Image (cartoon, rainbow, N blue to C red):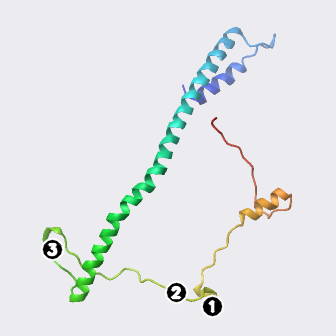
Amino acid sequence: MTLYTIDTLIVHCLSCVDDETGEIPEAALIELENLEMDRVKKVSAIVAVIRNQQAVADMLEITIPRLKRMMAAPSNTVERLKSYIYSSMKLHGEKKIDCGPVGKPRIQANSQPSVKFTGDVDTLEKKWQRITVELNKSAVVDAFKKGEEIPEHVTVETGDHLRLG
């Protein structure tokens, strides 16, 4: 049974109140007690899954940077060797070398030109600038905490979350 199903059945048992006495019938009380035990077992199993998945996530958080560091050496070797071949081909004015089944290195024009700018962006005309405007969330939260008015269309909500102890 899912936790949702158990919760639904508990609500149903609690709604089985005798109209005359105002009490919950004995059978419903027994069912309610069993459902509460099932609920605790289900929540316990879910907490175990959460802890297991958190352990996997923590392990990956440690492992991924290590794997990235391990990947850096062969990646750097690849880039260095490609640069080596590129320089040699440029030196000899070659566009392509047929290396048989291993591959055919060739020099190819980039599909997009690269753009570099070394000056001060403030000196550029507006049409050459990209300006990003976004909400200053820190300022909104500070104003909210101080009881000050916040801008229209902005809401600040304080939610809650589950903490496993």
Residue type at mark 1: give it: Thr
Identify the secondary structure beneath mark 3. Answer: loop
Which residue is pictured at 69% across the width and 13% down the height?
Answer: 29
Which residue is pictured at 59% across the width and 21% down the height?
Answer: 38
Q: Report the residue that reaches farthest toward the left.
A: 100
Q: Which mark is residue 165?
A: none
Q: CA distance from mark 2 to mark 1?
A: 12 Å
For marks 3 and 2 on the same chain, the one whose residue lies earlier in the sequence? 3
Q: Residues within 10 Å of mark 1 (few under 14, many from 20)?
A: few
Horizontal relation, residue 43 to residue 134: left or right: left
Residue marked by disc 3: 99
Question: Which quadrant of the figure contains the N terminus?
Answer: top right
Residue type at mark 2: give it: Phe
Q: Residues within 10 Å of mark 2 (few under 14, many from 20)?
A: few
Q: Residues within 10 Å of mark 3 (few under 14, many from 20)?
A: few
Horizontal relation, residue 94 to residue 52: left or right: left
Identify the secondary structure beneath mark 2. Answer: loop
Identify the secondary structure beneath mark 1. Answer: helix
Q: CA distance from mark 3 to mark 2?
A: 39 Å
Q: Nearer the viewer, residue 158 or 64?
A: 64
For marks 2 and 1 on the same chain, the one whose residue lies earlier in the sequence? 2
Residue type at mark 3: give it: Cys
Q: Nearer the viewer, residue 84 or 46?
A: 84
Vertical arrangement, residue 122 with respect to residue 138, above or below = below
For marks 1 and 3 on the same chain, the one whose residue lies earlier in the sequence? 3
Which residue is pictured at 57% across the width and 26% down the height?
Answer: 42
Q: Are marks 3 and 2 in contact (CB under 8 Å)?
A: no
Q: Are marks 2 and 1 in contact (CB under 8 Å)?
A: no
Which residue is pictured at 72% across the width and 66% down the height?
Answer: 136
Q: Which mark is residue 123?
A: 1
Residue marked by disc 2: 117
Residue 132 quadrant: bottom right
